[in-house]
Amino acid sequence: MRRGDYIVYVDESGDHNLVDFDPQYPRFVLAFCIFRIDHYVEHVVPTVQRLKFDFFGHDMVVLHERDIRRELHPFDVLLNGAVRSRFMSSLDALISSSRFGIVASVIRKHEFRERRGTQISPYEVALEFGLERVFLQLQDRGQVGKKTYVVFEGRGRNEDKELELAFRGSSQSSG
């Protein structure tokens, strides 16, 4: 099988717990970002690295929204308003200048729990929905018969094992 022209990165926002969840954030989001590999390698990666070197002096920083928003180390440099403004402008410019597609599965936990109960994982439902849409987008982009890598953010040993089982189930049911 030939390698495709795209790579897909997947990350989540919130957790998929349906029983005890934060009423301030009663959603679970699974986002799939679809990048053309050449654009990712030639534009996105060097631009992200430049941003990291400019603000942190190295590129080992992981850009987690929660840590940025709460200004947790190493993002405590953002406590300085001028630095925060420059950082956010640089981040906005990076995103604005990057070409990528997004497929997002958003689950409202209250409604999901009422309709589906607590036995079905919202993660699995979001994963299946997202993979179907990604498949359709890649099909529209001429990627039929080509291998596309889907990279998930690591979440912990047990969670990653759960994800692998859900992924294998979804990929078999969506062809």
Image (cartoon, helix red, strand yellow):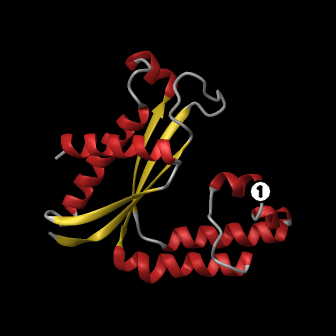
Q: Which residue is nearer to you in this view: 173 or 111?
A: 173
Instruction: Give the residue displayed 51% in from the left and 22% down from the top.
Output: 110
The quarter of the image holding the N terminus is bottom left
> To which quarter of the image does residue 120 belong?
top left
How many numbered marks does the figure carry?
1
Left or right position of 91 against 97: right
Q: What residue is drawn where x is 34% and y is 66%?
A: 7
Residue 72: which quarter of the image? bottom right
Give the x, y percent position of residue 66.
67, 51
Q: Residue at x 50, y 34 (%)?
A: 16
User: Residue at left 65%, top 73%?
Assistant: 90
- Work out whether 19 lies above or below 161: above
Position of 15 with respect to 51 (left or right) is left
**Residue furthest toward the right?**
80
Residue at the far front in the pictured view: 157
Q: Name the secondary structure under disc 1.
A: loop
In the rendering, at what x and y percent does residue 53 appear? 67, 81
Above or below for 50 versus 175: below
Above or below: residue 114 compared with residue 17: above
Q: Amino acid at mark 1?
A: Leu
Say whether residue 111 is left or right of residue 92: left
Residue 102 appears at what percent x and percent y?
Answer: 40, 56
Instruction: Determine which quarter of the picture holds residue 80.
Output: bottom right
Q: Which residue is mark 1?
A: 72
Q: Is residue 51 left or right of residue 18?
A: right
Residue nearer the viewer, 106 or 1: 1
